[in-house]
Image (tube, grey):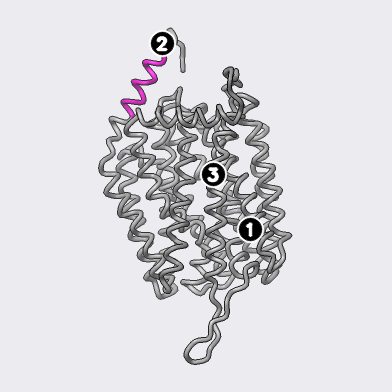
Amino acid sequence: MKRLPWLNKQVAGWAMFDFANQAFTLVILTAVFNLYFTQYIVPPEQIVGPDGTVEQDHTPGRQLWAICGVFAQVLIILLGPILGAMADFAGSKKRLLMGTWLGCVLFTASLGLVPPGAVAAGMILFILAYLFYGAGENFIAAFLPELSTQQTMGRVSAFGWTLGYIGGLLCLGGAAVFTFIWEGPTAYRLICVWAAVFFFFGALPTMLILRERKQPEQMPTGYNIITIGFRRLLDTYHAVRRYRWLFQFLIIMTIYLAGMQVVIWFAGTLTRELFQFGEQKMVLFILQITVTAVIGAFITANIQDRIGTRNFLIICMVFWAVTIAGAALARTEPLFWVVGNAVGLGIGALGTSSRAMVGLFSPEHKAGEFFGFYGFAHKLAAIVGLSAFAVADRLIADLHTVAASGTIFFILGFFLMLTIDEHAGRRVAAEADEAYRRERGGEPS
């Protein structure tokens, strides 16, 4: 069987971090700690209806969960320039990737120690776990330009995302088993430990195989790690702005990913609140979403290069707008499962093509720092999405309507993506690389 030309040991090692990463995204963020936090750690309020029936209101837990998410994203944005400077001037991306990996494993496992009612401990440990997870996500994305060319960027990115959802699927499968053996808080706490163990062993091959091409740089005189970090952020901002199409796409990406972030962060809550699923059915529901996410990433890898990544993203915007509206309006259980499969396809496709587009619009010699801005935009999208969800959840009593309001992000994304010129973006990146090589006397970038 002929090996794919872009698939080598380094690419496979890099993709294994995606494989392990989804254990946190899909198990901790989407399914488990979300519900554990909103159902047990933050006790629901008791509401007496007009007929005397007592109902549980989980809005306080959802509000605090959103606050935790926004706070964690802000911390990542503030620490990002400093961590990037540490990678380039005081060590290596791989060394810091290892630190973020071990930190995320430690704090994810610690989530399993949080007893019901310990709100402060739950908030602090989750913020720390997500902080290390988010930093690691940025570092692994920065390796992509070192491992692929402009021609193979989309396929390498799609390979990582596909493998990632396979990893998430396996970790969710284990989580589903726990829900059948244990009930209530015990199941959630054990699943936190399981996800941490999966993350540790899943990403271990990355640490053993992946090599870093770029060597540490010499610190300019008059700067330290903090000042050079924020100076480089400002310089990168000005550099990104000179690449018009990349800068424009990052702004658009911040808008439409805000809608997707709401779905990812609150999938467990929406499943329970909108569809009235119990713990076991909820995990199985998200499990089948992940199966279709793998399919979505695979389809993306085989289609986006043929029809254009920009055209593929436009299709994704329409698809997501219809899917979110369908999820909010669905009232029968068979329709819930259809919507779940649609959400999975959309997650696999949108995440894959978004990361690939940033690579296509970035000159190879600038791609590492520009992917840092991709991480910045990703975190900003989460802040926008979670803040909008929290405000809507406070102002609108009906959660179905709150969920439906997420459609606006994808409607805006559709119209804004029409303004993107993919050919021009690629051409500008290629011309910048060619000019860079000429300046260096013909050396490869």
Query: Residue 245, which numbered label?
Result: none
Q: Which residue was labeled with disc 3?
A: 163
Q: Which residue was labeled with disc 2?
A: 439
**Location of residue 63 in the rendering, given as x and y in whole percent from the top left corner:** 53, 64
Q: Residue at 69%, 50% (x, y): give it.
A: 107
Give the extent of the magenta segment.
Answer: 426-437
**Location of residue 235 in the rendering, given as x and y in whole percent from the top left corner:** 45, 27
CA gap, disc 1 and disc 3: 30 Å
Q: Secondary structure at mark 1?
A: helix
Q: Amino acid at mark 3?
A: Leu
Q: Amino acid at mark 2?
A: Glu
CA gap, disc 2 and disc 3: 39 Å
Q: Residues within 10 Å of mark 3 (few under 14, many from 20)?
A: many
Q: Which residue was labeled with disc 1?
A: 123
Q: Secondary structure at mark 3?
A: helix
Q: Residue at 61%, 58% (x, y): give it.
A: 173
Name the image quarter holding residue 312: top left
- 241 vs 445, left or right, is left
Q: Amino acid at mark 1?
A: Met
Using the rendered image of the protein, determine whether residue 241 is visible from the camera's viewpoint. Answer: yes
Q: Secondary structure at mark 2?
A: helix
Q: Residue at 58%, 29% (x, y): give it.
A: 85
